[in-house]
Image (spheres, coloured by chain):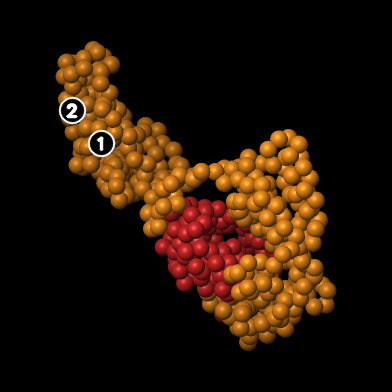
Chain colours: A red, B orange
Amino acid sequence: MSDYKTLGCAEISVGDKLPSLDIDITTGLVVCGALATRDFEPVHHDKASAVATGLPDVFMNILTSQGLMTRFATDWSGPEAVVKSLDLRLGAPNVPGMVMTMTGAVTAVDSGTGVVEIEVLGENNIWGMHMQGSVQLALPKEA
Amino acid sequence: MTANELNAFEDEINAFVGREVCPPTPAKDDVNTAMIRQWTEIIGDTNPAYTNEAWAAKSTRGKSIAPPAMMYVWGQEGFAVTTGRPADAQADLVSLFNKHGYTGVLGTNVKQEYFKEVSPNDNVVMEMVIDNISERKTTGRGPGYFFETLSTFTNQHGEKIGTQRFKVLKFIPQEQPAAAAAEDTLQVPTRIASPRGHDNKWWWDACDAGKVLIQRCKNCQTLRHPPRPMCGECQSMEWDSIESTLDGEVLSHTELHHPKIPGYQYPLVCAVIRLGEGTNIVSNVVGCDPSAVHIGMRVKGKVEQVDEKTMLPQFYPA
């Protein structure tokens, strides 16, 4: 178990920043992410369908964005954290060729329940905000 | 659409509130390690709670779990959606919107709450209702309505494991600028282009050539910036220019945080700089932490290429 540390609620303070994470948006990530989430809407795997909606290429589906947001949170917290909620507002599409940078900070700590809330922003380098929202994690009291 | 027609339309859409999109439906496949592994590989999630059985067995949970963000995945329809979705209340609502010109669709918010984790061999049962429809709203995309579906997830024992609220905007699409639709390659955005007119093009052209010039009245020698046709001191319209050494001092500064404008590098400090020659220039302070910038700070400028199309003076701590 020592290989994987989980943060304890007592170690966390409001304002703590999470390590930022750059995600290369590739056709592979967009298409495979859609299939791994069983989202077969053509706009996520067929360029012609995506172009017909006015976008330059296939674009990331919401379930992949949700996956990246929880990964970002639990990469930081460690594996004993229990994800309690995931609330996201959707912005500009993620299209192959972009880089999305994810940043986050702790906005609330409830030492009674061990639940911490982090605010997360995923911005791509071309169109800006892709997703913005919050993740709540239940952490052990002590690490 | 007349007021009466609008009322009739809104009565029709509001009748969908509370309607079932799908009754409680068990996922075709139980939660399983193959789908979890595929998801974790692609998302790049190395959390051992999902895929490291040995670790998971010794963890607080005592067993591995599925990634919570997969909750909606288990009940997905599958490849059939490539040729259309089956008729249900949501599809009927969407086609009613489409029939009245609200053909645009945009997912705007999704919120999941998780009450209980699931593990391989559990089954996720999903039901969905149309929970609410907003009043008619004016949005950046055009006039439209937000509707929200509420999905409730239970396991094979009937225990509630989570909910999902998904908000969609159905709108009347507005004319989009042609460029947005026609672009088929991504352009990395550049800074807002400098406006070059009759009275200031010469200044920007010099900047493109790596020089910052300061306009000088030929009659009374007074320097002025930004460029303009007439001397404020003697009203002469005769002028020439000198080149600045770009030695300066910060008179005032601010850091731009939000909204982030595409094409600009952050952190972004904008400052008014008093040049050694005596005129002021608005520019950026770079090459140090924004918190180190202060009034009175000595700076030295260099004309640099800040993006593919733009040359600008940038000031560094002297």
Tell which subunit mark 2 falls on.
B
Q: Residue A119 carries which label?
A: none
Relative side of B314 to A55, left or right = left
Residue under numbered circle 1 = B204
What SS does tag 2 mark? strand
Q: Residue B295 or A37: which is nearer the viewer?
A: A37
Residue B25 is at least partly visible in this image: yes
Question: Are tags 2 and 1 found on a single chain?
Answer: yes
Q: Split into 4 quadrants, where in the image is the C terminus of chain A?
A: bottom right
Q: Residue B282 or B136: which is nearer the viewer?
A: B136
* x 69%, y 67%: residue: B86
Vertical order, B225 against A61 (above or below): above
What SS does tag 1 mark? helix
Residue under numbered circle 2 = B241
Q: Position of residue B95 (x, y in %)?
A: 68, 55
Distance (Cα) linking label 2 and label 1 = 13 Å
Answer whether labels 2 and 1 touch (C-beta < 8 Å): no
Residue B58 picture quarter: bottom right
Residue A114 is at least partly visible in this image: no
- Residue type, numbered disc 2: Ser
